């Protein structure tokens, strides 16, 4: 699945269709995200254009620590914060309010990254066989212990231990294929 990174690489290699794909796939969502920061849809559209302008002119290096979308939205967020800083000098918004606003935005960004990671995990779970999916769901989403999950699945403790190990290994393999960066599993 192309998450925008290959389109950006093609753009960097001189293929303008890569940029067109980025605009088509991400501009609307980016505008809505930026509007949540600046509370003005016209300004959000301008900031989206400025974000894409930065991609075109500065061609920043994409580090695959997170998905392309997360990286692009982070650039957009920085553009919006620069806009707010510049306009705060001309408005009556206190620096303390702006600082709290930036902290809230940072928290929102972290929540967005967590949600994006959940989506990737769910997508990988769908690719597992039914028994692996079931055991991982019971343990990690329903919060059951191994013993409780063994009862539900009618397995003994040794079978459950082996099943959990195989399921986690298979899930890890699927996540690796997606380029998932994880801290714990």
Image (cartoon, rainbow, N blue to C red):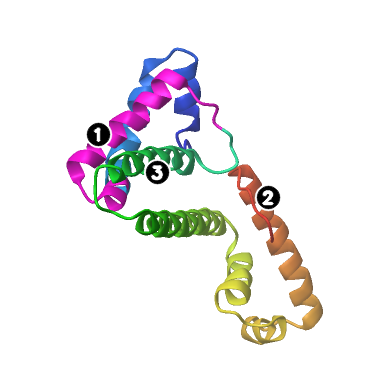
Which label is found at residue 180?
none
Point 68% across, 63% down: residue: 167
Q: Nearer the viewer, residue 102 or 70?
A: 102
From the viewer's perspective, is residue 2 above or below residue 168?
A: above
Q: Pointer 2 and pointer 3: residues touching (CB < 8 Å)?
A: no
The tag earlier along the polypeptide, 1 or 2, is 1
Residue picked out by circle 3? 77
Q: Give coordinates of residue 150: x percent, y percent.
A: 69, 82
- Tell me where residue 160 appears, x and y as whole percent: 74, 76
Question: Can you give x and y, in whole percent of width and height, for residue 114 in the image?
Answer: 51, 58
Which residue position is annotated with label 1? 46
Quadrant housing the C terminus: bottom right
Q: Earlier in the sequence, mark 3 or mark 1?
A: 1
Q: Answer yes or no: do the residues labelled 1 and 2 have beta carbons within 8 Å?
A: no
Q: Secondary structure at mark 2?
A: helix
Type of secondary structure dominating the magenta stretch: helix
Disc 2/disc 3 C-alpha distance (Å): 33 Å
> Where is 101 relative to 73, above or below?
below
Chain-order first, disc 2 or disc 3 = 3
* Residue under the point 40% across and 20% down: 56
Q: Closest to the observer: 2 or 100? A: 100
Which labelled disc corresponds to residue 173? 2
**Local SS, label 1:** helix
| Mark 2 crowd level (few <14, some 14–19, many ≥20, 10 Å Cα) | some
The answer to whether any part of residue 8 appears in the image is yes
């Amino acid at each position: 699945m192309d998450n925008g990174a290959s389109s950006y690489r093609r753009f960097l290699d001189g293929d303008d269709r890569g940029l067109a794909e980025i605009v088509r796939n991400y501009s609307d969502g980016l505008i809505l995200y930026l509007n949540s920061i600046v509370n003005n849809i016209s300004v959000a559209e301008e900031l989206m254009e400025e974000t894409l302008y930065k991609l075109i002119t500065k061609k920043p290096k994409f580090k695959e620590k997170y998905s392309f979308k997360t990286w692009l939205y982070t650039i957009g967020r920085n553009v919006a914060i620069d806009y707010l800083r510049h306009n705060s000098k001309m408005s009556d918004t206190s620096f303390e309010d702006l600082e709290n606003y930036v902290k809230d935005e940072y928290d929102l960004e972290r929540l967005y990254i967590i949600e994006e990671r959940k989506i990737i995990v769910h997508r990988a779970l769908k690719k597992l066989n039914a028994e692996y999916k079931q055991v991982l769901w019971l343990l990690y989403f329903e919060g059951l212990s191994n013993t409780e999950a063994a009862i539900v699945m009618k397995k003994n403790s040794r079978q459950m231990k082996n099943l959990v190990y195989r399921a986690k290994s298979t899930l890890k393999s699927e996540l690796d294929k997606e380029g998932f960066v994880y801290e714990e599993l």
